[in-house]
Image (cartoon, rainbow, N blue to C red):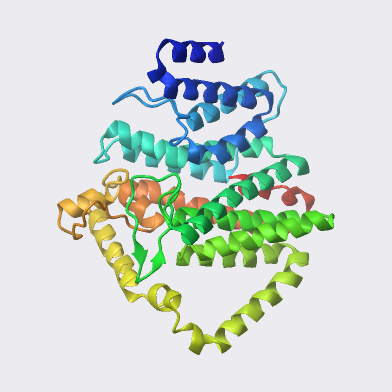
Amino acid sequence: MTLGLALGLTLWDAQRLPLTVALVAVAFALLLVTLDPLLGLAAWIAISPFAPFWNLDIHLGAGIPDLALARLAAGWAVILLLAQAARRRRRLALPNLLDVTLLLFGAAIVLSGLSSVYGASAGVQAAFDAYLLPFLAYVLARNLVQTPAAARLVLLTLVIIGAYLAFLVLQEQATGRVLFALDTVQFTYGTGLRRVVSLLGNPVFFGIPLAFSVVACLLLLTTEKRRLAQGLIVLLMLAFVVAAFYTYNRASWAGVALAVVVLSAFFGRLRRTLLPALVMLTLVGVLSWPILSQQPIIEERLADEASVEDRLNNVTVSLALWRQAPLFGIGYASFGLVALDQGLLPRIAKYVPAPHNSYLFVLTSGGLLALTPYLLSFAVIAFDLWRFRSPRPAWRSRPAASCTA
């Protein structure tokens, strides 16, 4: 019925083509979630970055929340999950301490949207998309990822995401072409290190999922027995590492390295291979440092004191803004505009400053009311990971939902 309505609208008025595309996309997404909730969840996560470019969201006009594909897919999946639980067709996972901390944080960060300088409607929607949708993905994953096959589907989804992100990074660095361009500023680091802005608009947004994709490849290697598949996984993982390198983002580099170290702590097979490799790479780096230190990437990124000073200044500015509203914060994503209005940061054309730190972002947006459960959630995750090391089978299945989220 939805497909027929969409085609009818297009034939009646060609200007309604974007709406037609959105209706068809939503119909297929909801159908996929209905037939297979986990597959629908995986598809939603993989496709959602392209939604603004492929007209996959239904725009309802100023002041009215859009019917975004991600919102509809997540909402429908939650409704199906609750309906299955009500009919005793599915047993819901019992709430735990992490659920409580995430719920408290989600409520606080959405509350901060009401006082955003961009307006209550825009602030709440932005906070919902940035934090509540991932929380819903976590809730769905806790209840849907309960078998090795389901966990493998999640890992393959992360590999697919890493594959197209790596392609975008490498092609932009090689050709200079920006694919899926957002309204963002493109510039270079130093004299010639290109800043990647395709699709996601910021290099750090590439680095985070690429680090997760490296983790997914390593986890797949622990169970894969076929030589050809192992070789393909290794090649993809190397591509992800190279792409993360060419983001020229130091946090992304650290994320990949830490991902390898943390995984090595849990899997003896990986530890026996990866830790010696990391030690050898570190040794090579130390011995060749006199040559490496003269390279632009070292001089203009690792040794760049200006960016470090900028981050330290952001800490000072963030604390100054936080003191103005210590409990509830100054409003979601209000750091940049408020800092400019108060003369705390210099104005740069077409650029709104950001704290460049998720903790400072949460602190300024939602105050202690948001930061406290935010920090507690990481403490709970760390505690769960520590318990995961126990040989008891009950703890061996816990990281499945965390990996998905």
Q: Is residue 53 left or right of residue 112?
A: right
Residue at position x 38%, y 25% from top? Answer: 59
Tell me: residue 129, above or below residue 65.
Answer: below
Q: Quadrant of the N terminus?
A: top right
Q: Position of residue 179 (x, y in %)?
A: 45, 47
Q: Position of residue 140 (x, y in %)?
A: 61, 35
Count of picture labels: 0
Q: Is residue 5 visible?
A: yes
Q: Is residue 284 left or right of residue 91?
A: left
Q: Position of residue 227 (x, y in %)?
A: 83, 58
Q: Quadrant of the C terminus?
A: top right
Q: Position of residue 273 (x, y in %)?
A: 74, 71
Q: Quadrant of residue 109?
A: top left
Tell me: residue 219, above or below residue 114.
Answer: below
Outermost residue, front side: 175
Q: Quadrant of residue 220?
A: bottom right
Residue at position x 31%, y 34% from top? Answer: 122
Q: Is residue 391 visible?
A: no
Q: Is residue 136 left or right of residue 394?
A: left
Q: Quadrant of residue 91?
A: top right
Residue nearer the viewer, 402 or 183: 183
Residue at position x 21%, y 50% from top? Answer: 338
Residue nearer the viewer, 299 or 158: 299
